[in-house]
Image: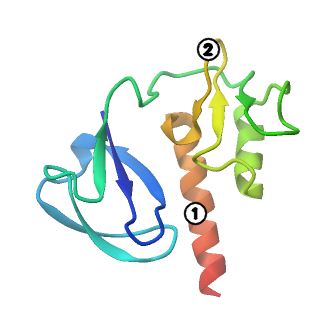
Amino acid sequence: MFLEIKCPSCGNQSQSPFDRVPGGKLKTTCNGCGHQFVLNKERNLNCQKLEEKETTGKVYGEDGWQVDLPGCQGIGYDLVGLNGLINTGMLTREVRVQPPAENEYIAARHFIQLKAFFEKYAQKEARRAGR
């Protein structure tokens, strides 16, 4: 079970394991824009619990990912290739991807395998914006 956190300022979304986020009011800072805001998982304030169906905690193979972008269709990507697309800004959390051996495209933000790549990219962008 995951908690999707959404910045009220810029709309940047991130996910955290539901049980690792404390109950009650929690002050946090957006990785995208640096805005500080309060979230409360019991009241769905700036966050929402993702149903198991929506979060893709299933471990998929490294090869054969499809990306729903012009110029990327029909190409099978491995996780390193997906990381490269994230680092160029082409693959965002909202772009739909299809993991190996699946039949539907789902927004990239729902895949555990891609979470760390998005977080590193957001940190890199924040550092670059702070210069």
Amino acid bearing label 2: Glu
Which secondary structure lies at badge 2? loop
- Point out residue 80 in the picture as x, y percentages from the top left corner: 74, 39
In the picture, the quarter occupied by the C terminus is: bottom right
| Discs 1/2, front | 2
Residue at the spot x=45%, y=55% of the render?
13
Q: Is residue 76 above or below residue 3?
A: above
Residue at the spot x=58%, y=46% of the render?
94
The residue lying toward the viewer, choosing from 67 and 78, is 67
What is the crowding at mark 2: few (fewer than 14 residues within 10 Å), some, or many (at least 20)? few
- Point out residue 65 in the picture as x, y percentages from the top left corner: 71, 26
The residue lying toward the viewer, choosing from 9 and 30, is 9
- Horizontal relation, residue 70 to residue 60: left or right: right
Where, by quadrant of the figure, is residue 107 drawn? top right
Where, by quadrant of the figure, is residue 124 drawn? bottom right
- Label 2, on which residue? 102
Q: How is colour applied across the structure in the image? A: rainbow
Q: Earlier in the sequence, mark 1 or mark 2?
A: 2
Q: Mark 1 to mark 2: distance in Å?
A: 28 Å
Amino acid bearing label 1: Ala
